[in-house]
Image: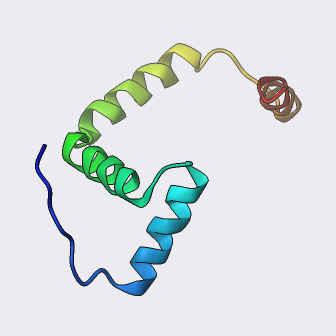
Amino acid sequence: MTTYTVKNIPANIYEKLKRSAELNRRSINSEIIFCIENTVQSQAIDSELVLKRARQLRRITNDIPITDDELKMAKEDGRL
């Protein structure tokens, strides 16, 4: 494994990193590696594909009306 030293981290960034590490029960080093992995391995969102899928879903569900109360119940049931 390669070792790398990060210098001059701004205090506010370090504090956020420290809080995040604590919340996730990781060391700061592990949190930095996690952040790097997420950044390097993330993929760009294809907005055209997202819109295409949303339009397909809208067509499929267009004839299935749902009331505000039904939507509220569905949300509450999903959170139990």
Q: Nearer the viewer, residue 14 or 60?
A: 14
Q: How is the image coloured?
A: rainbow
Task: Place residue 49 in its image quadrant.
Answer: top left
Task: Place residue 76 in its image quadrant.
Answer: top right
Q: Is residue 31 above or below residue 77?
A: below
Residue 57 in the image: state x and y as whole percent.
48, 21
Q: In this view, does 62 lie above or below 14?
A: above
Residue 16 in the image: state x and y as whole percent.
49, 71
Q: Quadrant location of the C terminus?
A: top right
Q: Is residue 19 above or below residue 47?
A: below
Residue 79 in the image: state x and y as whole percent.
79, 30
Residue 64 in the image: state x and y as whole percent.
68, 15
**Residue drawn 41% across and 85% down?**
11
**Residue drawn 14% across and 61% down?**
4
**Residue drawn 24% across and 38% down?**
46
Residue 12 in the figure: left or right of residue 78: left
Residue 22 in the figure: left or right of residue 27: right
The number of callouts visible is 0
Residue 10 in the figure: left or right of residue 21: left
Q: Quadrant location of the N terminus?
A: top left
Q: Nearer the viewer, residue 50 or 76?
A: 76
**Residue drawn 57% across and 58% down?**
22
